[in-house]
Image (cartoon, rainbow, N blue to C red):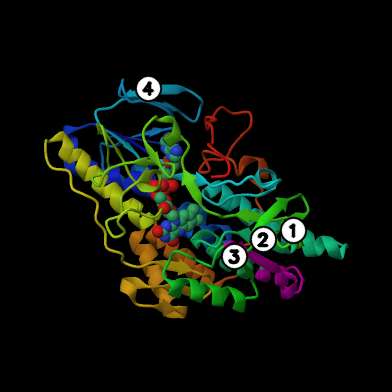
Amino acid sequence: MVVVGGGFAGYNAVKALARTVGDSAEVILVSPTNYFLYLPLLPEVASGVVEPRRISVSLADTLPRGVAHAQGEVDDVDLDARTVRWMDPEGRHHTTGYDRLVLAVGSVHKLMPIPGLSRYAHGFRGIPEALYLRDHLIRQIDLAAGADDPEERRARCTFVVVGAGYTGTEVAAQGVLFTRDLARSRGLAADEVRWLLVTRGEVLSGLDPHLGRTADRVLRDRGVEVRTGETVEEVTEDGVRLRSGEQVPTRTLAWCVGVRPDPLIEGVGLELAEGRLVVDRTLQVPGHPDVFACGDASAVPDPGRPGKYTAMTAQHAERQGKLAGRNVAASLRGGRCRPYQHRDLGFVVDLGGTDAAANPLHLRLAGLPAKTVARGYHLLSMPGNRLRTAADWLLDAVLPRQSTQLGLVRSVSVPLDSSSPEVPHHPQMAFPPERASGDVGR
Ligand SMILES: Cc1cc2nc3c(=O)[nH]c(=O)nc-3n(C[C@H](O)[C@H](O)[C@H](O)COP(=O)(O)OP(=O)(O)OC[C@H]3O[C@@H](n4cnc5c(N)ncnc54)[C@H](O)[C@@H]3O)c2cc1C
């Protein structure tokens, strides 16, 4: 059994599969990192609340014994020969055969044909990008504090986030608190720090309107300029130009406009819908009973919204992963594959400080009650490192945040146009393999 991708879907697929088949089958997980990344807490890494290893849960320590981890990135799937080819971190290729294949490769940044975007903007999907952003925010404030030119200081203290889904909203909400504290500690006035959240639609559109309204209010109360119905038209070294014509001098553009399936999916040669791999309700690829797919990369019919596919969320990916694991095991034993079903348990959006928005079991919460629910939910959902994460939260409540720049991840290591945002890029190294990153502009 080969599972490709160790995120919410793949990690849970491997766990469910290994528990069901025990020693009777060989289970191999191929993924470029040796950890499962708990993405919902990534904004807390960028704003210095938790350390990156807290949300990177070791595969070796948490997967059932007997699961083999092949560290590498798949760059070819041969459905006729039933093999996957993958490259390890030292640039060597390997080929592994399979009886059953689960594709759970997730998604990458959605790009748009905006001049300067790929060159000057950075995305937010992996540890390298979160570390880069944390250092970058600190660096901008440090350089602003030392700048004699008021124009330069203003530009360095201005931060633009594009996209107001959960990623952009949380990055802006956490970022404004972090940078204001930094500014004060460097002798700058907190109101010199300016954050803009630029979005075509409303804040958190597509989720329960209570979440969007709460987040919008908290952001505005903190002084974040929420620009709805707005887009970016050009990005340069010195700033961004908005559709309204406004020129915003800045050195920071966080691109959080959404995601598209990992480009590996395009190359597999199977039917796609909205760029995602078409599967039936049992997560099986039609016409290929030995191939399953789940999570962001797959177009899973949503039982609650006929004619639509499930949203790209961790909740869906995790549950689909578990089901894919069980269905693979059932298919091996001649059992019946079950269809995907889910019940919406609600959503949490952590807005930093003592604020959050949540609707657990459709109960609408804001402020401290929502924050408590959000943190409780994250602790329960994380497959490991809970105590360490809680310890970081406790320390953050009583101590000022650390504001050292380590400078380990530089801008060239985290290109926006990447098929592998989970690993830093080194132009001279073969890993991660360069793959076509798909159509720009979809
Ligand atoms: C910052 C951020 C915050 C989020 N917050 C929330 C939230 O609060 N709630 C929520 O429901 N959702 C949230 N999401 C969305 C959620 O994280 C995704 O929907 C979820 O991760 C999808 O799971 P997945 O397994 O499909 O993909 P991922 O979790 O992205 O995992 C994909 C895996 O595939 C691996 N991979 C990719 N390509 C290859 C390859 N070629 N070969 C081998 N391995 C490969 C990757 O390394 C990774 O391990 C957030 C996303 C982000 C970026």
Q: How far apart are the two marked residues, 3 and 1, measured between alpha carbons?
A: 15 Å
Q: How far apart are the two marked residues, 3 and 2, measured between alpha carbons?
A: 8 Å
Q: How far apart are the two marked residues, 4 and 3, measured between alpha carbons?
A: 43 Å
Percent position of residue 274, x then y: 43, 45
What residue is drawn where x is 88% and y is 62%? Answer: 149
Q: Which residue is mark 4?
A: 95
Q: Given this view, does label 2 or label 4 mark the residue nearer the observer? A: 2
What residue is drawn where x is 50% and y is 75%? Answer: 213
Q: Earlier in the sequence, mark 3 or mark 1?
A: 3
Left or right, 437 with reference to 372 = right
Q: Which residue is mark 3?
A: 172
Depth order, front residue of 253/276: 276
Q: Which residues are magenta?
A: 180-200
Q: Given this view, does label 1 or label 4 mark the residue nearer the observer? A: 1
**What SS does tag 3 mark?**
helix
Q: Which residue is mark 2?
A: 160
Q: How far apart are the two marked residues, 2 and 4, measured between alpha carbons?
A: 43 Å
Q: Name the amino acid type tagged 3.
A: Ala
Is 141 situated above or below 436?
A: below
**What SS does tag 2 mark?**
strand
Left or right, 96 with reference to 274 = left
Is 48 situated above or below 212?
A: above
Q: Name the amino acid type tagged 1.
A: Thr
Q: How far apart are the two marked residues, 1 and 2, measured between alpha carbons?
A: 7 Å
